Amino acid sequence: MTEYDTTAAAEDLAKRLRLLIDVAAAETGTEPTYTQIAQFLGERGIKLSRSRWTYMVNGHRAVQDRRLLEGLAAFFDVEPEFLAGVSGAATPERVSAQLDLVRAMRAARVKAYAARALGDISPNALNAISRYLDEEIAHT
């Protein structure tokens, strides 16, 4: 595996993990915490350090530990092949069903942040920013 392949694999895993975290948040109302995930894995004999989790979720290192990926897949209730990014692995139906909601939640967070960060901004400018963000999200 080349350095590019390793980087791409790490980024792909991070995207899938962040998506699954967002889906879990949409389903339960709160994001799963590292502590919850580590405890779930620990009960199955799988160790996950906080630093390794941070590397994984931020796409800094590729992970090929099959047991860890299987444990995370069990936590998020998806097939290990989906989490591992196996070619041809289907996106789980419940994840697909939540994608629009997840996108809307992400857009709402970005819009709220932009409104706070920009402070006194005209309603027209805020509407223009909102339209732009909506269009960008529709393309993803």
Image: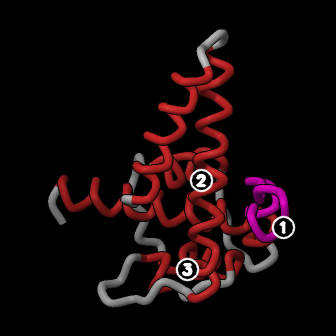
Identify which residue is drawn at 71% across, 76% down: 75
Where on the picture, by quarter, is residue 140? bottom left
**Residue 97 higher or lower than 115, as above or below:** below
Which callout, 3 or 1, points at the residue further toward the start of the chain? 1
Identify which residue is drawn at 49% across, 76% down: 83
Q: What distance separates the C-alpha of mark 2 from that of mark 1?
A: 21 Å
Q: In the image, which is nearer the foreground, mark 2 or mark 1?
A: 1
Disc 2 and disc 1 in contact, CB within 8 angstroms: no
On screen, residue 137 versus residue 103, left or right, reads left
Q: Amino acid at mark 3?
A: Ser
Residue 93: give x, y in percent of width and height.
Answer: 58, 89
On screen, residue 71 versus residue 26, left or right, reads left
> Residue 96's mark?
3
**Residue 23 higher or lower than 77, as above or below:** above
- Helix, strand or loop at label 1? It is helix
Q: Amino acid at mark 1?
A: Thr
Neighbourhood count class around disc 3 (C-alpha, 10 Å): few under 14, some 14–19, many 20 upward: few
Which callout, 3 or 2, points at the residue further toward the start of the chain? 2
How was the colour assigned to the protein in this rendering? Answer: secondary structure
Residue 113: give x, y in percent of width and height.
Answer: 64, 29
